[in-house]
Amino acid sequence: MDTFKSIDVKQIRTLKNELTRFMMTYKFALDELNTKIDILKQEFHFVHDYNPIEHVSSRIKTPESILKKVQKKGYELNLKSIKENIQDIAGVRITCSFISDIYELSNMLSKQQDIKVLEAKDYISNPKTNGYRSLHMILEVPVFMSDRVENVCVEVQIRTIAMDFWASLEHKIYYKYNRTVPKRLVRELTEAAESAAQLDRKMERIHKEMNELKEAVDETEEGHELRLNNERFYLPNEFLKLSERLSEK
């Protein structure tokens, strides 16, 4: 009897260690991707004096949530099957100011040499029937462990503020009604999604026009400013012309 207890304890410990390492890889993948996003955010801010990212949040599915999805989809209950079939265990949601920012950011992420884009779904150009809009990507991110490299899937959702506002409220309403929403409210939610899309398009036009005006003003200035770590450096036109000549060589 003691022997069986000893074996059970060893098996439980082994299983616990495997589960811990499994979940840790997803945490590390999120850390890796969040670092990349933060670098892109800072680079864009310094180079263009503009920040396309309003907010970033991330999450990892709980073991209970993973188990429910395994049972619902009918997958085999083992770590290999879970890793191969469930690609949204780790998720990142990025909120941008404008629609153009979404595509710019997704393009920058796609160009990362150690990231592989496994799937991309554009629900902005092709909204869901309920009006949902967002850009979804499944990225494969390398995680360097002590004894191996794990390629981990991370789901990335990129939206505008208006898209995120609508999606959050729509989720709350469906949760409140236990996913049985009256047809009248479904219709109004779809109309609200279109209103949010119209707002995004209008703000995009204003943003584009403001950029054109800013570029026209910049061309008439005698010099430019460089900002790094809250410090300002004045760059005369002569210095910029010198840089252009050096880059041409």
Image (cartoon, grey):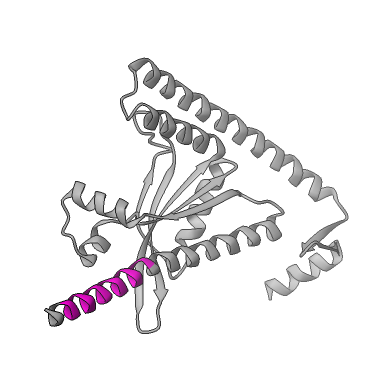
Residue at the image position 78 percent from the left and 61 percent from the top: 227
| Quarter of the image that includes the C terminus | bottom right
Q: Of residues 116 and 73, which is closer to you in this image?
A: 73
Residue at the image position 44 percent from the left and 54 percent from the top = 59
Q: Position of residue 141 (x, y in %)?
A: 40, 66
- Where residue 86 sits, quadrant-wise, is bottom left
Q: Position of residue 244 (x, y in %)?
A: 74, 68
| Magenta highlight on residue 21 | yes
- Lateral position of residue 68 relative to residue 150, left or right: left
> From the image, which quarter does the N terminus lie in?
bottom left
Q: Nearer the viewer, residue 29 or 128?
A: 29
- Most common SS among magenta residues: helix
Query: Residue at left 41%, top 24%?
Result: 190
Q: How many marks?
A: 0
Q: Position of residue 79 (x, y in %)?
A: 24, 66
Give the magenta-colored segment's residue range: 5-23
Q: Is residue 22 magenta?
A: yes
